[in-house]
Image: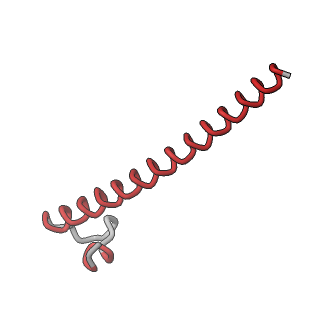
């Protein structure tokens, strides 16, 4: 994020230039990509965790059925 886009607020009285809007949109796009990547990593971690729990429960049921 550039210094110029850090200080600009869309509620400012001055209208943003086309270059400023482009910078802001690029910053937002980059933040969205990072957020999406982090969410995907967390989703995969949680799915793996649930898969392990299910596998463990199935094994316990199979062992109990064989006793």
Q: Position of residue 23 (x, y in %)?
A: 21, 66
Q: Position of residue 43 (x, y in %)?
A: 51, 45
- Which residue of the protein is positioned furthest toward the bottom in this rendering? 3
Above or below residue 37? Residue 51 is: above
**Quarter residue 46 falls in:** top right
Q: Is residue 19 left or right of residue 56?
A: left
**Which residue does the image show at 23% across and 61% down from the upper left?**
26
Color scheme of the displayed model:
secondary structure
If the image is split into quadrants, where does the N terminus sit? bottom left
Above or below residue 37? Residue 64 is: above
Above or below residue 34? Residue 54 is: above
Q: Is residue 27 left or right of residue 34?
A: left
- Which residue of the protein is positioned furthest toward the left in this rendering? 18
> Depth check: 35 or 19 in front?
35
**Which residue does the image show at 63% across and 39% down from the upper left?**
52
Q: Is residue 41 left or right of residue 18?
A: right
Q: Position of residue 60 (x, y in %)?
A: 77, 30
If the image is split into quadrants, where does the C terminus sit? top right
The count of marks equals 0
- Which residue of the protein is positioned furthest toward the front in this rendering? 67
**Quarter residue 25 falls in:** bottom left
Q: Is residue 14 left or right of residue 11?
A: left
- Which residue of the protein is positioned furthest toward the right in this rendering? 67
> Depth check: 7 or 15 in front?
7
**Quarter residue 31 falls in:** bottom left
């Amino acid at each position: 994020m550039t210094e110029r886009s850090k200080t600009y607020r869309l509620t400012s009285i001055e209208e943003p230039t086309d270059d400023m809007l482009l910078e802001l949109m690029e910053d937002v796009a980059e933040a969205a990509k990072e957020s999406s990547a982090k969410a995907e990593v967390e989703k995969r971690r949680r799915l793996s965790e649930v898969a392990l729990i299910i596998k463990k429960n199935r094994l316990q049921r199979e062992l109990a059925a064989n006793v």
